Amino acid sequence: KKLKKKEKKLEQISQLLKQNNDNTEEQKENNNKDISSSIDSNKYSIFSFELMNSFKQLNRFNGHTNYVQGIDYSTFNDIQLLYSGSSDKTIRVWDINNNKQIQLFNGHSSYVFCMKFSSYHYHNYNQQVICSSSYDKTIRFWDIRSNKKELYVIRRDNEIFCLKFIQLQKKRNEINLCYVMNNGLLCIWG
């Protein structure tokens, strides 16, 4: 019965997507029309909420002793990994498939605000590296497989709240690290 109900929802979603695609084609034909007037917002809202109603909690990971400030995700050889950074000063790596913590990094001396998986290190050096930013004014690089305390540390003059790996147009073979400090500076490291 549940399967039939889900199949019916999927069919409805499929029809809504097709209608939305038809609306998109119509928009291309009528370039002089206001874009917002050609989108049926009621259909989009129904689609979003119908999809959300079918969601359920799949996993729950316990381990942090304070607020989790950020998360990231990656996959390796069919293994799904979730990374979390917390006000408890730790970064944890979770195996989603087995619902367990597989790594703990605790080199920061203050809150961890953000962490990102580095696809650059993975694709160029076959390393599983995550990067974390903290209120302790450091950015740290961690190798998930080697269980080393840290690979590299960047020290700054202010707390570092968020970071992201970016590829600049000028240097196609390199990835740069973009981060924001609490003094309002947006910095690119590379």
Image: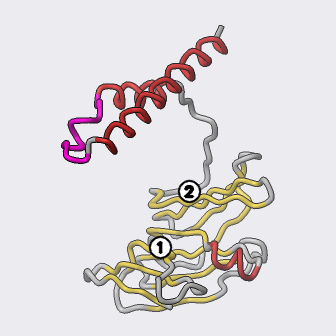
**Nearer the observer, 10 or 165:** 10
Residue 13, placed above or below residue 90:
above
Write down the region rendered in magenta: 31-41
* Magenta region includes residue 39: yes
The residue lying at 54 percent from left, 30 percent from top is: 55
Lateral position of residue 105 relative to residue 14, left or right:
right
**Residue 78 position within the rendered picture, expressed as x and y whole percent measured from the top left:** 78, 53
Residue 74, placed above or below residue 171:
above
| Mark 1 residue element | strand
| Type of amino acid under label 2 | His
| Mark 2 residue element | loop
Residue 162, placed above or below residue 94:
below
| Type of amino acid under label 1 | Lys
**Nearer the observer, 189 or 30:** 30
**Residue 68 position within the rendered picture, expressed as x and y whole percent measured from the top left:** 48, 57
Splitting the image into 4 quarters, where does residue 67 fall?
A: bottom left
The residue lying at 71 percent from left, 74 percent from top is: 122
Q: Do the residues labelled 2 and 1 touch (CB within 8 Å)?
A: no
The residue lying at 66 percent from left, 61 percent from top is: 93
Residue 89, placed above or below residue 187:
above
Q: What distance separates the C-alpha of mark 2 from that of mark 1?
A: 23 Å
**Nearer the observer, 33 or 189:** 33
* Label 2 Cα crowd, 10 Å radius (few <14 / some 14-19 / many 20+): some
Splitting the image into 4 quarters, where does residue 56 fall?
A: top right
Quickly name the residue at label 2: 64
Quickly name the residue at label 1: 164
**Residue 102 position within the rendered picture, expressed as x and y whole percent measured from the top left:** 74, 60
Q: What is the number of the mark on residue 103?
A: none
**Residue 183 position within the rendered picture, expressed as x and y whole percent measured from the top left:** 26, 83
Q: Of the residues under marks 2 and 1, which one precedes in the sequence?
A: 2
